[in-house]
Amino acid sequence: MNITAIRAIYRYEMMRFFRTLLQSFLSPVISTSLYFVVFGAAIGSRIQEVEGVSYGAFIVPGLVMLSVITQSISNASFAIYFPKFIGTTYEILSAPVSFLEIVTGYVGAAATKALFIGLVILATSTLFVDISVAHPVAMIAFLLLTCLSFSLMGFIIGIWAKNFEQLQLVPLLIVTPLVFLGGSFYSVNMLPPVWQTIALFNPVLYLISGFRWAFFGLADVPVGMSLFAIAVFTGVCMGVIWWIFRTGWRLRV
Amino acid sequence: MSAILSIHDLKKSYASGQVALKGVTLEIERGEIIALLGPNGAGKTTLISIVCGIVNASSGSVTVDGFDIQRDYRAARKLIGLVPQEVALEPFEKVWNTVRLSRGLFGKQRDDALLERILRRLSLWDKRDARINELSGGMKRRVLIAKALSHEPRVLFLDEPTAGVDVELRKDMWDIVAELRAEGVTIILTTHYIEEAEAIADRVGVIARGEILLVEEKAALMERMGRKHIVLQLAEAVEGVPPALAHHRLEPGADGHSLVYTYDARGPRTGLTQLLNDLAASGLRLKDVQTRQSSLEEIFVDLVREKAE
Ligand SMILES: Nc1ncnc2c1ncn2[C@@H]1O[C@H](COP(=O)(O)OP(=O)(O)OP(=O)(O)O)[C@@H](O)[C@H]1O
Ligand SMILES: [Mg+2]
């Protein structure tokens, strides 16, 4: 195991993040505040409570998930797409590192950044609503797993993308809708029965449900199921990345 | 002495169908400097990229110090440094950070003193905190060299290190190559310039259209490449070679107003003095004189023809 290489990649990637720390910090604070103003005030005045939780508090887990998922994907996809675009991947490919080490470095950094953003959003939320966390360990675990799995997915997108449009395509066309339809801002029980069934095919639902359970002890689907879903998702992503590095797909001609 | 780099029957066809290497076999000795000389598209970069793990070979094998580049990729790559042909650097990164990353990637412990020595040697020390996009083209090239040297490679690939580089830097590059060689580093460089190969290499390999045409000691090859032509522009038209000059290796020029003399500039006797004496005696009036060296292209053509025969 080339630990030094993992550390080098991780450190290098994190430095990029620290260079723009203020930006990285301000934008989630502002967007979270906006969500509370818009959703909290406009919708919250009509929906008082969801399953016994005030609406403002109810949307916090969804809000955190939304940002963490989009951040994980954009961080990780950009981290590998950019070197590919400017040609600096030659160095990674020619270095004595395994795919696992490369992924650990890049994905680890992307996940760390997303985690940081998630925590900032959580902290910002407490300025607007009272939230208590019923299962803190589970909450952190869900957060970590989400950062990790979606960073892995972002990494794949970054390798797959041949241009900037494609880089934006998957997050825009697939991920954002899935997150919004995954019950970020409502409980699936509020949907008509047909849509409830359809929603069950949305993997993001399991994440948000599990995450929300960690906060309020209530879930749309069983917690075990949530954990299982995210584990499968992480495993699939790892498998794809392993295959990419073995064949050199889109990296090595 | 065993070869540090063994390339055996290496073939590469790109997905586009382009055949870049048609079975290259090459042994490179420990500590030597070998120049790969070849025209555009010969396959030089492809060859280097396969050895470094950037391009997948279609078939064939490569070992570096006995380590197979696929099975023992870690051990093999640890030994290799690469200065690529194209400048590829992250524009907003600082020089120091990018060099430090390179060392880390190769699993080497942090060594700031070493990096400082390298940057100083490449006149980049003052620029260590500058961003890449604030550097000139020549400086960026030097950053690439610093990155490659940062992990103390035993085998160094320089892919056209002096393309687009001024005379001074070129000289400096040659000095660095000589220093590395003194430390026992094996160096493989590609170039279009015969003079460059001549200035620094021990051996020269000529590659064209995906094939190694020959690998020779520099001296032997230089002799081959030393052919020069003198074009004698005459004031009057001539028909063929005038009888007074028939015993010289002259050919009539295409325009009917010139004679072309071909000779070996490195040979012990060029026959130039005699030719000029005879020319004066013949009463032909000279208008102009040009000299021309066999171009690399011509030499390649000759080599390919020789090989076919
Ligand atoms: N990624 C690629 N995809 C398809 N064909 C390629 C690719 N890279 C190189 N080639 C082709 O392979 C052949 C050899 O190219 P290569 O870059 O190895 O030549 P070279 O000797 O380095 O040339 P130069 O002196 O111009 O750098 C060329 O015909 C080139 O068009
Ligand atoms: Mg080349």
Image: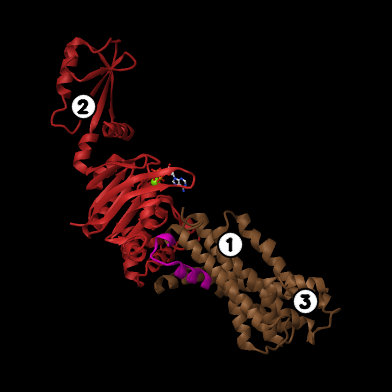
Chain colours: A brown, B red
Kindly identify the residue that appears in the image at 82 percent across and 74 percent down: A193
- What residue does disc 1 label? A157
Label ID, residue A188? 3
Magenta segment, principal secondary structure? Answer: helix
In this picture, is A142 found above or below B260? below
Residue B224, percent across and down? 22, 35
Foreground tag (3 vs 1)? 3
Residue B115, percent across and down? 34, 66
In the image, is A115 to the left or to the right of B174? Answer: right
In this picture, is B99 found above or below A212? above
Kindly identify the residue that appears in the image at 70 percent across and 68 percent down: A178
In this picture, is A84 found above or below A26? above
Label ID, residue A169? none
Which span is picked out in magenta? Answer: A92-108
In the image, is A157 to the left or to the right of B87? Answer: right
Depth check: B144 or A132 in front? Answer: A132
- What residue does disc 2 label? B263
Q: Residues within 10 Å of mark 2 (few under 14, many from 20)?
A: some
Q: Residue B225: name its quadrant.
A: top left
The amino acid type, in three-letter code, at marker 3 is Val
Foreground tag (3 vs 2)? 3
Residue B169, percent across and down? 33, 50
The amino acid type, in three-letter code, at marker 1 is Ile
Q: Chain of mark 2?
A: B
